[in-house]
């Protein structure tokens, strides 16, 4: 396990430092490989970060952006991560970035997995940066503890990039990157705010199996930088 914790006094200070780090990483990817790739998560926590990145100077036309997971809802739905990213990150100066969608016109996530994997294959990999969140139950992306699909999602030998997930503790069918796909990243960040989330993470690392708290599977297997503020 290699968890590096960077703590900041305020969420604003975290956002400023995180945005600078990400821009530096993406610039390096563009300079060395011609394009850079960024994988992000939904939720409220990254909204300020998305806003700041969207207003930052960068060769955004050379950046590919995708999601760690998506709910199988129509774009425009309040639960759509695609809408969240398009409305908050791929705006302003970052509007030139190329967005790689996980959701397709398939009837459900099970039928859409192959299309999602095909879309992801067009991105520069390993991903230059991955930003993960974590739920209070220890899930990350849409790898939910004790769901029927969690072991498939954590299987490092499956050869799959995506899986369909039907969580029992959250609404909406989802499509999620698998653990091996998430770990196929040069820089992995865990973006958390609040004492409660930090304690959940520490308890998961110390006391839980990977199936019980899937975030531990990431921390156990790759260097992760925790970006945290109260």
Image (spheres, grey):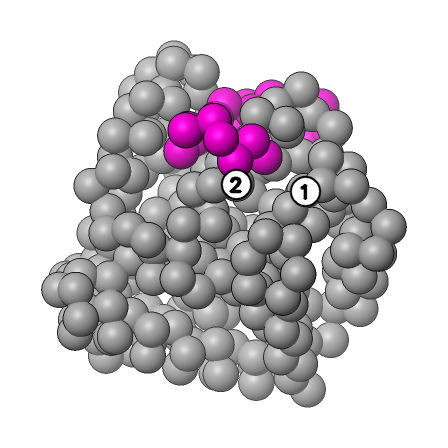
- Residue at 57% x, 69% y is 225
- Residue at 25% x, 75% y is 28
Q: Mark 1 sits on what residue?
A: 214
Q: Secondary structure at mark 2?
A: helix
Q: Nearer the viewer, residue 150 or 102?
A: 150
Q: CA distance from mark 2 to mark 1?
A: 9 Å
Tell me the quarter of the picture where residue 208 sits.
top right
- Residue at 72% x, 35% y is 211
**Magenta segment:** 154-176
- Residue at 33% x, 16% y is 106
Q: Is residue 65 visible?
A: no
Tell me the quarter of the picture where residue 97 sits.
bottom left
Q: Mark 2 sits on what residue?
A: 179
Picture layout, residue 106 above or below residue 12: above
Q: Quadrant of the C terminus?
A: bottom right
User: What is the x, y in percent for residue 164?
Assistant: 50, 23
User: What is the x, y in percent for residue 99?
Assistant: 26, 48
Disc 2 + disc 1, Cβ < 8 Å: yes
Q: Earlier in the sequence, mark 2 or mark 1?
A: 2
Left or right relative to 111: residue 169: right
Q: Secondary structure at mark 1?
A: loop
Q: Quadrant of the N terminus?
A: bottom right
Per the image, is 228 magenta? no
User: What is the x, y in percent for residue 108?
Assistant: 43, 16
Per the image, is 167 magenta? yes
Q: Is residue 15 visible?
A: yes
Picture layout, residue 36 above or below residue 182: below
């Amino acid at each position: 396990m290699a968890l590096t914790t960077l703590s900041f006094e305020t969420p604003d200070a975290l956002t400023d430092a995180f945005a600078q780090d990400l821009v530096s990483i993406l610039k390096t990817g563009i300079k060395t490989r011609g394009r850079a790739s960024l994988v992000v998560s939904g939720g409220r926590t990254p909204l300020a970060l998305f806003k700041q990145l969207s207003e930052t100077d960068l060769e955004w036309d050379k950046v590919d952006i995708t999601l760690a997971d998506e709910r199988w809802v129509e774009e425009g739905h309040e639960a759509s991560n695609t809408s969240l990213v398009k409305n908050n990150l791929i705006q302003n100066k970052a509007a030139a970035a190329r967005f790689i969608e996980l959701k397709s016109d398939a009837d459900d996530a099970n039928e859409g997995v192959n299309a999602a994997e095909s879309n992801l294959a067009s991105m520069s990999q390993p991903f230059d940066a991955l930003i993960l969140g974590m739920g209070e139950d220890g899930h990350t992306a849409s790898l939910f503890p004790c769901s029927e699909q969690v072991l498939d999602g954590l299987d490092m030998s499956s050869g799959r990039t995506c899986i369909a997930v039907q969580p029992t503790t959250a609404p909406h069918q989802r499509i999620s990157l698998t653990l091996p796909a998430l770990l196929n990243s040069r820089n992995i960040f865990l973006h958390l705010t609040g004492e409660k989330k930090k304690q959940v993470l520490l308890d998961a690392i110390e006391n839980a199996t990977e199936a019980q708290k899937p975030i531990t599977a990431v921390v156990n297997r790759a260097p992760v930088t925790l970006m945290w503020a109260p």
